[in-house]
Amino acid sequence: MTRLGVYTGTFDPITLGHLNIIERSRSIVDELVVGIGMNFTKSPMFSLEERISLVEQSVQDFGFVQVRQYDGLTVDFVRSINARIMVRGIRPWSAEFEGEMKMATANRQLAEDVETVFLISEQHLWHVSSSLVREVALHSDEATLCQFVPPSVAQAVMAKVQS
């Protein structure tokens, strides 16, 4: 039986931290769907189509990954594709951990057949976030951004910032 997992987020933009979680999820799932969600409480730098394209480019060498968009409750998306594993990346800071635990508990209440698995990225990536990337881009260059995102993403971020 194939173990299908789902890793969701806005990925605005996808970072090396996200990619580390995707790569490491290979040890617990056979196939992974990266679900790119619509979050109406955020004002994304990239359109949904741009985020999908950047994620697809970034995971093209990972043979076990598909990219899909979704809206609505994440747990409903997970169930709609017959997955039973939600992969979540967390940084070891209390505020983020608390929020993720609340969401995992709510998801468990909504769908008892779906398990949430937490992965902590490699320590050298703990500080990397999409918001950090956007901030660094305002005051830096493409080469510096490549410390946090793949080169194609750094190029796209800098193009947005400079336009």
Image (cartoon, rainbow, N blue to C red):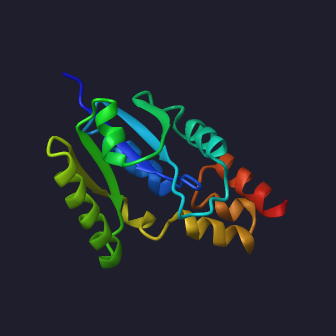
Q: From the viewer's side, name the closer residue of 53 and 83.
A: 83
| Residue visible at 75% across and 65% down in the picture | 141
- Which residue sits at x=49%, y=35%? 67
- Residue 90: horizontal and vertical position, in percent? 34, 63
Quadrant placement of the N terminus: top left
Query: Residue at the location (66% across, 44% down)?
Result: 50
On the image, the x and y values in percent for residue 8 come to: 41, 48
Of residues 49 and 124, the one drawn nearer to the viewer in this rendering = 49
Total label count? 0
Give the residue displayed 60% in from the left and 37% down from the top.
57
Q: Quadrant of the C terminus?
A: bottom right
Left or right: 75 with respect to 61?
left
Whole-percent x and y of residue 10? 51, 53
Task: Find the residue positioned furthest to the right.
Answer: 163
Image position of 14 with respect to 141: above or below: above
Q: Quadrant of residue 143?
A: bottom right
> Would you identify the image quadrant in which residue 53 lies?
top right
Q: Residue furthest bottom?
A: 94
- Location of residue 40 in the rendering, given as x and y in whole percent from the top left corner: 54, 58
Furthest toward the top, the residue is 1
- Answer with left or right where residue 157 lies relative to residue 24: right
**In the figure, 140 relative to 4: above or below?**
below
Asked whether, in this view, residue 76 is left or right of residue 138, the answer is left
